[in-house]
Each structure stands twice: as structure tokens, then as C-alpha cells.
């Protein structure tokens, strides 16, 4: 799809402009994600998400009107604003979902965030076909479609309750917290839930306010924040965004007859295996699925390299490379795609969680920026062997996950936090069975399940 804003531009200039478009989106995400902690504490989870939609509306409108105004700068600025929206949403949404979800469904509900993302990607890929909205005349409409889900969320989000944990623990608004609990559960007896939150609030009040700098300085948070950052890096440095940024050209080099449709096929695989992860995450656990995904992606990256390197001598390898790409995407959505987003929220209690989400989110978007800017140059330098770099990184993240990342399935927020204080992360899941037997739900919904109706 050509933008048609500067028809006199040469090929090199267009590539430079495309690189700026890709990069400026990540820059917006980097800057805004670092503010997630402050904004979520100041406005609250729900109000922050609601106001954040204004960024999406403004950014989508600017991109949609850029051709009419003959302004490439409007497109760049719109991409930046949309990136800022996504940076905030990538922290606010998992935080909100994690705080209102019951322990038994925390992973599955957290995966819905990723499912919404990949569904949006697939819809955009389909609408971007030349026969639909990807033509020279209609691409501004495609850019403007961004405002539609924004309007929908602005209409529906006011009907969702604010996080009761935020209201009670952070704002000390017991009455509003009770109201939110009753709306979430349909029950009137919320005493058990408030007792649990009261204990967490008591412990939090005894500690100093946790800032971003304090998370790095404090030995209590150093180990979980390192895990959080590396989990986010394992998502972005896996190479999956390199595939989606430049998927069509990769399929062309692989000899695929219709590379655009093959890219849409990869998007469909993206959605399908996110659903698979949705059903497996509470059965197999976060750690197991993450390692399975990393290992599978590493194998697919090696197969992809062999196939692309031998393509000229063995044309049939184009089919192998295509299957390797589909497998790479499938394994990504089994583990590294959805899990890091909600796993970070599980590693921290209510006090340090906003700052931790900001740090992890900024790490994710920074890595996204690096891949978006650097992959094409590295690919030109390394040729078909570029994915061996990602294979090596995936192997490193797999080893790190095996030795340092604990399992959080079935554990309360307090149990997870206490585990880091008692023992190294590599030992935390040795007593998983005992923890699950002794565990009580950490969220409002789970506690109310033990109560009785009035």
C-alpha cells in the first residue's frame, strides 16, 4: 500500500519514511508506558483507560485525514499518538484485569488481552488488502477505522466497575470498593474480600511508597523486576515482530506466490493459537507454556534459516520456510505472546505493581523500537542467517526461564511476593503443590465464592 503523499519520493526515501513510521509508533509506546504507574495511581485504572481512548481517537483521526491535508507529518504524528495510546493500554489493561480476576481464572482472563490484540492485527491485515481498504483511494479510511473501537470502548467502559483493590488499598474508599465487589460478583456479603484487602493494605502502609527507582534499589523487588524485564524482552527479541513488520517480503523471498495472503494466514494462526493458550494456561501453568513456546520458536527459527539458505538450490524449501514461519507464530502465541503481559502483574503486590508495570512496559516497547529500526539492516547484512540471532536469544531466554522464573499458577499475590523473600526464584516452585493446597484466593471474586448469600 502506497500512501501517495509524496509521489516524487524515490525508493530510498520511501524506505526511510516507512522506517520512521514503524519506529515512531514504538517511541510513543516507550514514552507513555513509562508513565503507567503514575497515571494509574492518579486517575485510577478505569478512568485512565477511559481518558486514554482520547489519544486513540486523535491519532486515528490525524492518520485518516493526512492524505486530505497532503501532510506526511500528520501521518507520523498520528502514529506517535497511537503508539502512546498503546503504550498506556499495554500496562493499564493487564493491571486492571489482574486485579479483578479470580485466582483460578487470572491467567485465562489475562490472555484475553493478547487475544484482542492479535484479533485486531488480523482484521487490519484483511482490511488492508487492495480489494478492500488498502487501495490508493481508500487507505485513509483504513487508517481512520482506528477510531471505531475507541468509540465503542468509551461507550462501554463506564459500565465496568473500578478495581475494588485500587479503591480500598490505594484510595481507602471502602464503600465504593464494596459497591464494585457486589457488581462484579452479584453477591452482597463481601466481608471476606475486604478482610483480605485490609491485611494487604496494612502491610503496604508499613512500607515506603514504591517508586521506579526504589524497585531497582530494594533487594525485595530486584529479583522479580529482573524476571519481569527479561520476560518482556523474550517477547520482543524473539523475532516475531520482525516477521510481522516485514512478513510479506519474507514470503516473497521464500518464493510464495501470494505473499500478502500468506501473511494473513500467519495472522490467522496468531489468533488460533492464542485461543489454545487461553485454555492451557491454567492447566499447564505460565512457566511451562512459556518454555514450550520459546523452545518451539527456537527450533522453527533454525528450520527457517536452513530453508531460506537453501532456497536457490532446493526451490521446494519455500514450503518448509512457510511452515516454519507459521510454526514460529503458533509457538509465540502459546507462551511468549500472552504470558509476559499478565505475568508481571502477578509478580508484584498492590504497592509496587504500577511502577513494575511501567518498567516492564517500557522495556517491551524499547525492544520493539530496536527491532523495528534495526531488523532490516541486520537482515541485509546477514541474509537468511539473520534468524540464527533470534534462535540464540530464544535459547538464552529458555535457559533463564527454566532456572529463574517461578510458577505462579494457583498462587495468590501475597504468596508469590513472599516466595521471593523466602528463597531464590529457582526454588519457588518446588513446594507448588503445598502452596496450592493452602492457597486462598487473593482476589475479591474468589473470596466471595467461599461466602454465603445474604
Image: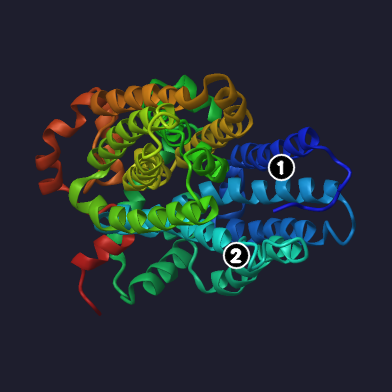
Is disc 1 surrounded by few (<14), some (14 to 19) or many (20+) residues within 10 Å?
many
Q: Quadrant of residue 18?
A: top right
* Residue drawn at point x = 61 percent, y = 54 percent: 43
Q: Which residue is mark 1?
A: 21
Q: Give the position of the C terminus as an image quadrant.
A: bottom left
> Do the residues under discs 1 and 2 have CB atoms within 8 angstroms?
no
Q: Out of 80 and 419, give the one closest to the viewer.
A: 80
Is 342 left, or right, of 376 in this rendering?
left
Q: Residue 64, located in which quarter of the rendered image? A: bottom right
Q: Residue furthest bottom?
A: 454
Pointer 2 local density, CA inside 10 Å: few below 14, some 14–19, many at least 20: some
Q: Is residue 155 visible?
A: yes
Helix, strand or loop for disc 1: helix
- Residue 180 is situated, as x and y percent measured from the top left of the image, at 43, 68
Nearer the viewer's eye, disc 1 or disc 2?
2
Q: Is residue 273 above or below residue 365?
A: below
Residue sitting at x 84%, y 48%: 72
The disc placed on residue 127 is: 2
Residue located 41% across and 53% down the image: 270
Disc 1 to disc 2, C-alpha distance: 19 Å
User: Is 375 displayed left or right of 95 in the figure?
Assistant: right
Residue 277, image x, y percentages: 30, 52
First-in-chain label (1 vs 2): 1
Amino acid at each position: 500500500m502506497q500512501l501517495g503523499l509524496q509521489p516524487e519520493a524515490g525508493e530510498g526515501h520511501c524506505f526511510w519514511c516507512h522506517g520512521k513510521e514503524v519506529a515512531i509508533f514504538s517511541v510513543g509506546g516507550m514514552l507513555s508506558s513509562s508513565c503507567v504507574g503514575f497515571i494509574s495511581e492518579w486517575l485510577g485504572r478505569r478512568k485512565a483507560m477511559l481518558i486514554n481512548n482520547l489519544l486513540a481517537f486523535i491519532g486515528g483521526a490525524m492518520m485518516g485525514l493526512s492524505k486530505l491535508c497532503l501532510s506526511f507529518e500528520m501521518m507520523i504524528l498520528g502514529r506517535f499518538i497511537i503508539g502512546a495510546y498503546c503504550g498506556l493500554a499495554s500496562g493499564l489493561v493487564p493491571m486492571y484485569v489482574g486485579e479483578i480476576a479470580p485466582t483460578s481464572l487470572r491467567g485465562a482472563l489475562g490472555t484475553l488481552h493478547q487475544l484482542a490484540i492479535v484479533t485486531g492485527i488480523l482484521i487490519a491485515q484483511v482490511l488492508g488488502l487492495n480489494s478492500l481498504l488498502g487501495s490508493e483511494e481508500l487507505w485513509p479510511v483504513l487508517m481512520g477505522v482506528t477510531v471505531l473501537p475507541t468509540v465503542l470502548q468509551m461507550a462501554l467502559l463506564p459500565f465496568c466497575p473500578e478495581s475494588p483493590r485500587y479503591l480500598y488499598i490505594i484510595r481507602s474508599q471502602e464503600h465504593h470498593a464494596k459497591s464494585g465487589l457486589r457488581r462484579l460478583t452479584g453477591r452482597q456479603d463481601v466481608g471476606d474480600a475486604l478482610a483480605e484487602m485490609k491485611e494487604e493494605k496494612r502491610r503496604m502502609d508499613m512500607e515506603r511508597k514504591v517508586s521506579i527507582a526504589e524497585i531497582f534499589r530494594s533487594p525485595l523487588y530486584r529479583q522479580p523486576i529482573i524476571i519481569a524485564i527479561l520476560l518482556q524482552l523474550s517477547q520482543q527479541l524473539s523475532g516475531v515482530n520482525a516477521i510481522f513488520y516485514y512478513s510479506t517480503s519474507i514470503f516473497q523471498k521464500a518464493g510464495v506466490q501470494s505473499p500478502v495472503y500468506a501473511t494473513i494466514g500467519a495472522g490467522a494462526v496468531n489468533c488460533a493459537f492464542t485461543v489454545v493458550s487461553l485454555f492451557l494456561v491454567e492447566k499447564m501453568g505460565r512457566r511451562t507454556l512459556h518454555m514450550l513456546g520459546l523452545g518451539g520458536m527456537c527450533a522453527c527459527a533454525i528450520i527457517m534459516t536452513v530453508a531460506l539458505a537453501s532456497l536457490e538450490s532446493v526451490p521446494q524449501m519455500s514450503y518448509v520456510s512457510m511452515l516454519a514461519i507459521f510454526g514460529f507464530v503458533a509457538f509465540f502465541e502459546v507462551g511468549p505472546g500472552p504470558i509476559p503481559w499478565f505475568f508481571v502483574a502477578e509478580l508484584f503486590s498492590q504497592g509496587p505493581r504500577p511502577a513494575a508495570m511501567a518498567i516492564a512496559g517500557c522495556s517491551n516497547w524499547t525492544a520493539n523500537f530496536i527491532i523495528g529500526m534495526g531488523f532490516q539492516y541486520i537482515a541485509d547484512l546477514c541474509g537468511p542467517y539473520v534468524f540464527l540471532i533470534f534462535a540464540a536469544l530464544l535459547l538464552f531466554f529458555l535457559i533463564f526461564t527454566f532456572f529463574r522464573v517461578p510458577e505462579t499458577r494457583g498462587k495468590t499475590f501475597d504468596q508469590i511476593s513472599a516466595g521471593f523473600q523466602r528463597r531464590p526464584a529457582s526454588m519457588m516452585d518446588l513446594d507448588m503443590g503445598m502452596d496450592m493446597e493452602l492457597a486462598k484466593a487473593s482476589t475479591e471474586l474468589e473470596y466471595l465464592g467461599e461466602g454465603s448469600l445474604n
